[in-house]
Image (tube, rainbow, N blue to C red):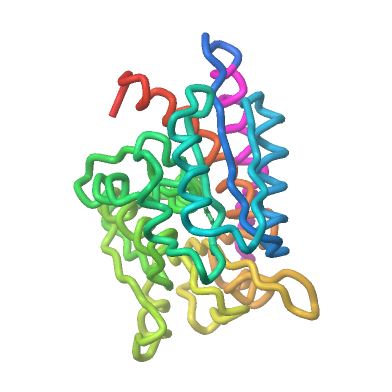
């Protein structure tokens, strides 16, 4: 039987409705700022989507488009202004940044309680400590999409392909918190198929178009595809969707899977950031 398609747009809509309701009920309007440096076409598309959805749900929104040659000090000054701005509760600096800028230093300069991406050491550390504060949006998106299948996670074999700080590692930690048995594979993993074939839950976030083929997937598995790769034939994920959907139990499409959910989680993080900033919660 072919896999059930996990409709990321539909799952995201449910969250966006709740976010909109919470904003309407809130005394103060939560605010989100996005900083985009340069004109990386993929980053521009992502940021445009984030802006559109932020405005639709009713957030106060401010966008900073900076020249690709902006100095590191110039960028740090802007982040400092945003850190001090009481109308802005969450900020994201779209990555990647140009070579003249130290990405780690920039992320570290964001106040942890305004870090809507959850990339600062305080927020990532809280995740390691099972004391979640602001959790990276894509990792949250993967977990919510897995939960949307209604399948149990505890005790299952979960395999995450990719070990990035912004997706692979935080997703592995969230699955560990859900009591899955987690394996993280990466570019130096020997015999990837041996691992993926054993996965009840397979999350793929390695940026390699159609890497995961049908024969690498356990029948009935939940397959979450984080990849967005531009090819001459259009956008494709890290999973060979047409083949894998014949064996998986559930699968996310690209586009329309993890992407829309990530944006919903980012906006939800902005609401969480406002509460954390006010000391309502950690
Ligand atoms: N670049 C690719 N994905 C992301 C993300 O989730 N947040 C930021 N800030 N930059 C990104």
Question: From the viewer's perspective, is residue 228 above or below residue 279?
Answer: below
In what quadrant of the picture does the C terminus appear? Answer: top left
Tell me residue 22's x, y (percent). Answer: 54, 18
Q: Is residue 65 left or right of residue 119?
A: right
Question: From the viewer's perspective, is residue 161 above or below residue 139?
Answer: below
Q: Main secondary structure of the magenta part?
A: helix
Residue 185 can be seen, yes or no = yes
Tell me residue 126's x, y (percent). Answer: 25, 45
Tell me residue 71's x, y (percent). Answer: 53, 59
In what quadrant of the picture does the N terminus appear? Answer: bottom right
Q: Quadrant of residue 247?
A: bottom right
Residue 225 can be seen, yes or no = no
Q: Residue at x 48, y 43 (%)?
A: 79
Q: Residue at x 37, y 39 (%)?
A: 111
Q: Is residue 176 magenta?
A: no
Observer-nearest of 71 and 129: 71
The stretch in magenta equals: 1-23
Q: Is residue 103 left or right of residue 22?
A: left
Tell me residue 200's x, y (percent). Answer: 40, 65
Q: Residue at x 44, y 39 (%)?
A: 80
Q: Quadrant of residue 23?
A: top right
Observer-nearest of 56 and 111: 111
| Residue that extends furthest to the bottom in the rendered view of this protein | 190
Observer-nearest of 248 and 144: 144
Q: Is residue 5 magenta?
A: yes
């Amino acid at each position: 039987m072919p896999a059930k398609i996990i409709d990321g747009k539909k799952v995201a809509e449910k969250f966006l409705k709740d976010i909109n309701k919470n904003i309407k009920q809130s005394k103060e309007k939560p605010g989100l700022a996005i900083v985009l440096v340069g004109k990386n076409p993929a980053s521009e598309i992502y940021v445009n989507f984030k802006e559109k959805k932020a405005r639709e749900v009713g957030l106060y929104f401010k966008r900073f488009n900076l020249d690709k040659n902006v100095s590191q000090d110039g960028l740090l000054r802007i982040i400092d202004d945003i850190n001090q701005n009481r109308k802005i509760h969450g900020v994201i600096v779209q990555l990647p940044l140009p070579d003249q800028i130290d990405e780690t230093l920039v992320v570290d300069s964001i106040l942890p309680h305004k870090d809507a991406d959850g990339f600062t050491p305080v927020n990532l550390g809280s995740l390691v400590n099972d004391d979640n504060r602001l959790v990276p949006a894509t990792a949250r998106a993967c977990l919510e999409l897995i939960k949307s299948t209604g399948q149990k996670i505890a005790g299952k074999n979960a395999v995450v392909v990719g070990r990035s700080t912004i997706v692979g590692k935080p997703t592995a930690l969230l699955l560990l918190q859900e009591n899955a048995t987690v394996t993280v594979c990466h570019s130096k993993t020997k015999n990837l198929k041996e691992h993926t074939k054993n996965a009840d839950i397979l999350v793929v976030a390695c940026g390699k178009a159609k890497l995961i083929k049908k024969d690498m997937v356990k029948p009935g598995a939940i397959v979450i595809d984080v990849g967005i790769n531009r090819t001459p034939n259009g956008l494709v994920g890290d999973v060979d969707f047409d083949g894998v959907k014949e064996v998986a139990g559930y699968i996310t499409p690209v586009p329309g899977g993890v992407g829309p959910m990530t944006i919903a989680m980012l906006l939800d993080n902005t609401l969480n950031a406002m509460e954390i900033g006010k000391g309502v919660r950690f």
